[in-house]
Image (cartoon, rainbow, N blue to C red):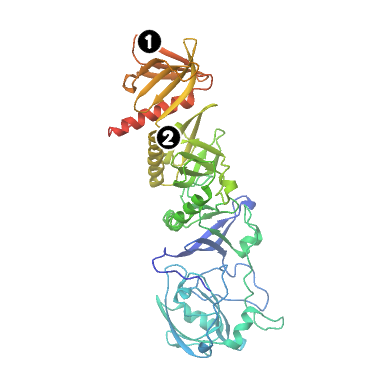
Amino acid sequence: MRWKMAAGSRALKSGLLELSSPAAGGDTWQRVLAVLSEDCFTVSPEEGSASPRVGEREREAPGAASGVLNGEASPLVPDSLANIKRTVRIVKQDVGGLGISIKGGKENKMPILISKIFKGLAADQTEALYVGDAILSVNNYDLRDATHDEAVQALKKTGKEVVLEVKYMKEVSAYFKNPSASSPISWDSPVTSHKTASPVPSAGDRKEGKSIPLKMCYVSRKAVPSDPENRYLEIVSSDGILSLFLRAKDAATAQSWYSAIQTNAASLLPKVKEELRVLLEGLTVSESKEIRNIGWLTEQLFNDGRKNVLALLTEKDLLFYNSLPRSSEALNHPTHNYPLIATRLVHSGPSKGSPLHNTDLSFALRVGTRQGVETHLFCVETSHDLSTWTRLLVEGCHSAAEHMQEISIACTWNTKDCTLHVHIDKGFTIYSQEPGTNQTVLLYKPFEKLRMSSDDGSRLLYLDFGGPEGEIQLDLHICPKPIVFIIHSFLSAKVTRLGLLA
């Protein structure tokens, strides 16, 4: 069946863009018809951009979309419609026109026939036209004895509203799908299926058209190289295999496409989250099975490069992937897995000296690990994205602290083997490690007494409570960064409880 938009669905969009050819050094651009549906973005070259064979010159209906959509077979036509005159009213779209191609004409001893109906455009949305329909008249202008050129001109002169009188020609429709070698008319060949996706569309791909599913696709306007006219748009499939680099006629058009694609992609997020939640069941990658957020981030690398990472935020962890995990095995092996309790947001907003484009939309994280502190700088596409990620990361850190409540770690203090116990409400307690279950409290301090905490980055933790004992030095025997970050998360969560900013 032809695709149709259900009630309440996201609006369709279609129009002309230019597709870059990276294989040609990025300087070659091809005009393409771009069509956005609820779950897919498709680009196809303009019909007629390739040189026609002698004697087979084809015309596209003026006002129709200039492109060959990777379409579907025309729906089965009820037998009751065969050779019956019908009147169909079409309201042209601002871009894409009627959305049909025509063939035939008096010179070919054939009526004017609809040879293609472009998926998602005006004619398709009527759900009342079929490949093989003969156009008898357009706005009461008789086309039954018209040449191909006369039909072209008649369609070109139509306004916003077009009324077609049509009749389905069952006896000739088969020629559109199965032309014989001796056929005097160049009928359309069946639309071939897409080739296996490749990182850069090949010449064949650009000729046939390409589609990227919107489900968890990456879409960006932060082009590299720089985009002084702000006209570029990049779309990458969720598996990272297929990438389309596009150029619009102006910044407003580029933004319009970006917003439309993002809106439709965002509508698919609930389904993505539910699929991932099911995959999370029984896995050890995260204690929490609730997915708070998922989205693409652009990370700035230390070598001045950048890469796209898919970030998945659960109630307790921040997971990074190179592509959308589609199996339990892939989901269980993120490239990075950071507990939120040891993750700190250290920057959000303008970033001085960052080579990332549009650095007003960036945030930085520091993570305390057993190997030391890791710092990550990310860029997002919109201020809404920035607000959402920073808010959820801070809330996630506080939530993780409230859930954990306490942590214990073995240490040495004043040459004695001890245990440091930190509780979000009760504070700091140092116990002596003695045989059996007996424990002696060597020191107790509430959080309110803590003046300073620091570490040597190797194994020593310093705590200053302002007491007569002075600064306490604890040897943790491992890198102290995780415990330092956890202490900070406990403090931040406690301050937030009071309604203050942490």
Q: Gap between marks 2 and 1, in whole Å?
A: 38 Å
* In this rendering, position of residue 195 left or right of residue 80: right
Residue 474 screen position, x and y as percent: 46, 15
**As displayed, is residue 157 above or below residue 400?**
below
Of all residues, the one furthest to the left in this rendering is 499
**What residue is shown with label 1?**
470
Picture quadrant where residue 380 is located: top left
Q: Secondary structure at mark 2?
A: loop
Tell me if mark 2 has few (under 14), some (14-19) or many (20+) residues whose alpha carbon lies within 10 angstroms of its own.
some
Picture quadrant where residue 361 is located: top left
Residue lying at 62% horizontally and 83% vertically, measured from the top left: 174
Residue 428 screen position, x and y as percent: 38, 21
Tell me if mark 1 has few (under 14), some (14-19) or many (20+) residues whose alpha carbon lies within 10 angstroms of its own.
few
Q: Nearer the viewer, mark 2 or mark 1?
A: 1
**As displayed, is residue 303 above or below residue 23?**
above
Query: Is the C-beta separation of discs 2 and 1 under 8 Å?
Result: no
Which circle marks residue 351 in the picture?
Answer: 2
Depth check: give the residue in front, 280 or 2.
280
**Amino acid at circle 2:** Ser
Picture quarter with the C terminus: top left
**Amino acid at circle 1:** Gly
Depth check: give the residue in front, 305 or 197.
197
